[in-house]
Amino acid sequence: MIRNFTKGGYETSGADRAWPRHGRQAMGKGRATWLLQELMEKHELLRRRRLFSPPRAAAPVLLYLLMGPATNAVAAAPSDAPAPLPASVAIHISGNRSFYWNDRKLRYLIVTDDPGVGDSLHGTLPVGQTAVHFGRLMRAESLPASFLAAGGLTANVARARAVIGRENCLVCHTVEDSNASVVPSFTTIARSAVDDAGTRSRWATIIVKGSDTAVGGIKMPPHPSLGEADVGSVVDFILTLHAADANPRLVPLSGELRLDDGRPLAPAGQKPTGHENRSYVYVLAAAYRRNGDAADAAPTASAVLRLRSPLFAADEASGSGGTKAAAVANLGSVRIAEDAGAYLYFDDVDLTAVSAIEVTLARPSKGAVPNDGRIVLRVDGTDGRTLGSAEIAAAPGEGSRERLAIPIEHIEGFHRLYVMLEPDSSAHRSHASFASVEILPGVSDDE
């Protein structure tokens, strides 16, 4: 039977299969068929436990997504009177569920299930009843209502993307502004037009009948086989790109999001390093409203995923032992460990698809006690599993910092991460001034 829900997935006992924990072994589009089968098995298991409705024809969009365990879903509170099983929304993503890294893609899939009504995974629940928003917030900011607002374009966006793919529109166009686009991107077209009846009619005519005007030596070909609904969905989709810079913006039930969101987080002319503006979080939020519910009513069910910067300042540690706070010029607050066994720890860190952890130490001023000893990375306790270690003497210096990138063993899921100071191999006195800890990703599919 299902015992409880964890951040890594459902735990099961008896004859039931455990909810799989996807990680590096699932990275790559060659796993698509396996992933589809696993999701179908999850739903079948939960259906038997009266948590999901019966599976039906599978949605083909799953075939290219790389999915891990879903984010926690929040369902409407049941009333005292007997009521149907609650609806749920789940966010499946590829890769890590704690952090964003600039210029990386986030592949995601939203699955809504309303027992007795249908579910979006098998195409039995209208996609327009689930609105999905993506945007950025300050880390300390509570979730604005706009992230869980109702939206009427999600269904058309999903339909338009299917039409655009089927008709090979992306052979010439791109969605976002890009030098690779042979003709104007859909975003460029949207920003140069006014959303009115005249624009919609003119674009619909061009899509169906083509255009005699050549751009870059290419004429828009006709698409006479497209029905009015398909043409209208494409027009709607292009016009939504007016608001490509909106925060939050409406996005489809599945797809890819580039986590620099088209706006570099580093100063102009500099390459983003992955942790500028680390006070921000990216938020993917999905809200489902049953058919007939008012647009301004609270969602029937919702789910929210937050991704933060992979860089932790030492003073952001969830806790510590044997350290003291100090201020260092150009670095701010650091934590000084003067004896072996001192540590910092960080709660709820997803280590899925992480290759290394970089520990930055404050370089001591002339005459001060130097950094010495060994940095050891452990999880779930000071005596927990060791992921990696390195001697401080090997740390290269740069300005006021010494950086130690420590490769880690393969591990998945959420853990408490310990950064510990231990004696080095020569048994010298241990001393370290912790400045920051950065989580480094493995190689992605985009590289």
Image (cartoon, helix red, strand yellow):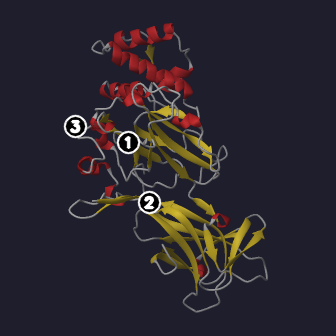
**Rounded to the nearest whole Å, what is the CA distance between mark 3 and mark 2?**
36 Å
Regarding mark 2 in the picture, which secondary structure is present there? loop
Q: Is residue 1 above or below residue 359?
A: above
Q: Residue at x 60, y 79 (%)?
A: 392
- State the residue position of label 1: 86
- State the residue position of label 2: 442
Regarding mark 1 in the picture, which secondary structure is present there? loop
Marks 1 and 3 in Cβ contact (< 8 Å): no
Q: Name the N-terminal-most of marks 1 and 3.
A: 3
Amino acid on which disc 2 is placed: Gly
Q: Nearer the viewer, mark 1 or mark 3?
A: 1
Q: Residue 316: x percent and y percent?
A: 64, 63
Q: Is residue 113 above or below residue 309?
A: above
Of 429 and 73, nearer the camera is 73
Q: Residue at x 38, y 25 (%)?
A: 160
Decide: few, some or many residues near mark 1? Use Cα within 10 Å; few <14, some 14-19, many ≥20. some
Q: Residue at x 68, y 83 (%)?
A: 338
Q: Nearer the viewer, mark 3 or mark 2?
A: 3
Q: Nearer the viewer, mark 2 or mark 1?
A: 1
Of 433 and 77, nearer the camera is 77
The dot on residue 56 is 3
Q: Is residue 307 above or below residue 424?
A: above
Q: Residue 142: x percent and y percent?
A: 62, 45
Marks 2 and 1 in Cβ contact (< 8 Å): no
Decide: few, some or many residues near mark 3? Use Cα within 10 Å; few <14, some 14-19, many ≥20. few
The dot on residue 32 is none
Q: Name the quadrant containing residue 427.
A: bottom right
Q: Name the quadrant containing residue 268.
A: top right
Q: Residue 333: x percent and y percent?
A: 73, 66
Amino acid on which disc 1 is placed: Pro
